[in-house]
C-alpha cells in the first residue's frame, strides 16, 4: 500500500513537471531562455543548429533544458527549451534581426575563464598553450571566479539578441 502510494506520487510529480505549460503556438519548436528568465525566439542560425542530428555522445550537441526552472553546471537558467515547456506567464520576445551577424562578431576569449581565475597561462614553443590552476587560490574561489566570468559573458551574448 505504501509503495503504491509512493509510485503514484512520483508519477504524478513527473507528469506535473513535464506537462505542457502553454497552449499550441506557431513558431519553431524551441526557444531560448535567458539568465533572467525571459525567453526569446531563435535566430535562423539557432534553428539550423537545433535541426541538425547529433548522436547521444556528441559534445557539440546543444544543451536542451528539460524544464524551465532547470539550471546548467554554472547555475545559469539559460538554454534552449521546447516552447511548450515555457510557462504561459513568460512572454516570448522576438530575436534581433541581426543577431546571427552580431553573434559572429562576438569576441570570445577562449582563455577568459582561466584569466579570470588567475591561472598561469604559458605559451609553449610549439604554439600550444598550457593553463595551470593558480596554486594561491582555493578551488572554491577559483571556481567562483570562473563562474562569474562565464555568466557575465553569457549575459553579454544574450544582450545581442535583444531588440
Image (tube, rainbow, N blue to C red):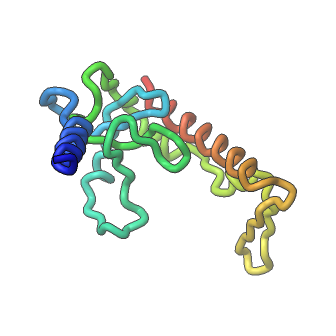
**Residue 116 seen by the camera:** no
Q: Nearer the viewer, residue 37 or 51?
A: 37
Residue at 22 percent across and 30 percent down: it is 21
Image quadrant of residue 27?
top left
Residue at 40 percent across and 29 percent down: it is 96
Indicate left or right for 100 with 48 as reference: right
Residue at 40 percent across and 41 percent down: it is 70
Indicate left or right for 160 with 148 as reference: left
Q: Quadrant of the C terminus?
A: top left
Can you say whether 61 is above or below 18 in the image? below
The residue positioned farthest toward the bottom in the image shown? 126
**Residue 9 seen by the camera:** yes
Indicate left or right for 64 with 10 as reference: right
Q: Nearer the viewer, residue 57 or 46?
A: 57
Q: Pinpoint residue 105: horizontal percent, then vertical percent.
A: 54, 44
Q: Pinpoint residue 56: horizontal percent, then vertical percent.
A: 31, 67
Q: Pinpoint residue 78: horizontal percent, then vertical percent.
A: 45, 39
Residue at 45 percent across and 37 percent down: it is 77
Amino acid at each position: 500500500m505504501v509503495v503504491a502510494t509512493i509510485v503514484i506520487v512520483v508519477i504524478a510529480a513527473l507528469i506535473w513537471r513535464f506537462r505542457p505549460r502553454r497552449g499550441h503556438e506557431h513558431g519553431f519548436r524551441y526557444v531560448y531562455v535567458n539568465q533572467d528568465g525571459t525567453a526569446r525566439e531563435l535566430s535562423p542560425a539557432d534553428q539550423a543548429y537545433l535541426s541538425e542530428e547529433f548522436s547521444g555522445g556528441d559534445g557539440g550537441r546543444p544543451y536542451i533544458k528539460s524544464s524551465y526552472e532547470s539550471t546548467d553546471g554554472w547555475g545559469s537558467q539559460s538554454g534552449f527549451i521546447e516552447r511548450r515547456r515555457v510557462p504561459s506567464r513568460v512572454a516570448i520576445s522576438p530575436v534581433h534581426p541581426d543577431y546571427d551577424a552580431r553573434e559572429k562578431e562576438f569576441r570570445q576569449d577562449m582563455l577568459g575563464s582561466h584569466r579570470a581565475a588567475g591561472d598561469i597561462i604559458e605559451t609553449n614553443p610549439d604554439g600550444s598553450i598550457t593553463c595551470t590552476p593558480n596554486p594561491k587560490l582555493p578551488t572554491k574561489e577559483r571556481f567562483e571566479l570562473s563562474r562569474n566570468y562565464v555568466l557575465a559573458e553569457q549575459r553579454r551574448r544574450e544582450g545581442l539578441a535583444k531588440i
